[in-house]
Amino acid sequence: MPDTPARNTGAHLVYAELKRKILTLELKPGERLYEPAMAAALQVSRTPLREAIRRLISENLLEQQATGGVLVPQLDAAVISELYEVRAAIESLMARNACIKATATDVEALHAILARNAALVEFADDAMQQGMALHAKIAGIAGNSWARRFHDQISSQMERYRHFTNSSQERRDQALAQHRALVDAVAAGDPDAAAKLAFDHVMAARDAALRAISASGLATS
């Protein structure tokens, strides 16, 4: 019992390192993970490694094969497009609901996140975190627990694709402008405008992600 926290901490550190390798393409799409070699490279036992692998499989960042092996999922353009389409529909619904339910305090909180987004737009990781925070806040204001659940699930799966576009200053600037317009629509209580802006914002992100992935030569279709 006393060593459980350490074991859990070890698994989390392994998880974080494997996730970093996947997101930065240090582990390439289609690459297979060999547990003995990976455990040796990370200087850990097989137990925390397996815990980390199970967690990454649950997030669709690793894929369990029928043969028992584990590999980094391929970047399938059709699958990516479908995922963004579902997210766009959910974001649109939540933006519409947020317009109806937002209080003055909620709008202030959105403007505060937007200000941080603007201040950090030149820093890729920080800008991405603020963008995610803005979407999460809108989801919270909307108050639809099912939409929020699906939103959170999809967001974790899409983190891999965000890293393809987040390195582009042009895309970060575009996203910031879209965030501003969305917050303005919520503040004005215009549900139709907010719903359309949220939908178009996600579809623009989809197009940027697909272009970047195609340019990388890593897409399978």
Image (cartoon, helix red, strand yellow):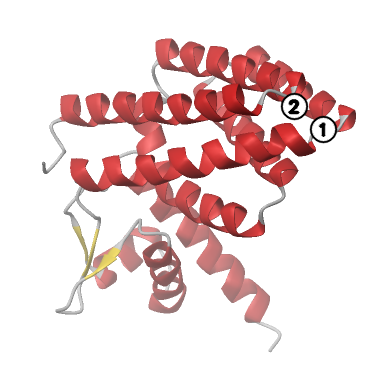
Residue 179 coordinates in the image, percent (x, y): 59, 20
Looking at the image, which residue is at 66% across and 58% down? 145
In the shown orientation, is residue 14 left or right of residue 137? left
Among all residues in the image, which is located at the extreme right?
105
Residue furthest to the bottom in view is 1
Q: Mark 1 points at which residue?
A: 106
Using the image, tell me which numbered label, if any, was put on residue 190. Answer: none
Kind of residue at badge 1:
Asp
Determine if residue 26 is in view: no
**81 lies left or right of 12:** left
Q: Name the residue under label 2.
A: 110
Q: For the residue marked with disc 2, what is the amino acid? A: Leu
**Please, is residue 75 above or below residue 99 in the view?**
below
| Depth order, front residue of 121/17 | 121
Quarter of the figure with residue 114: top right
Number of residues whose C-alpha sits closer than 10 Å to that of mark 1, classed few (under 14), some (14–19) or many (20 or more): some
Q: In this view, does 46 lie to the left or right of 197?
A: left
Between residues 29 and 138, which one lies in front from this camera angle? Answer: 138
The residue depicted at 46 percent of the width and 41 percent of the height is 89
- Seen at 33% across and 48% down, the residue is 22
Q: Are marks 2 and 1 in contact (CB under 8 Å)?
A: yes
**Disc 2 to disc 1, how far (Cα)?**
6 Å
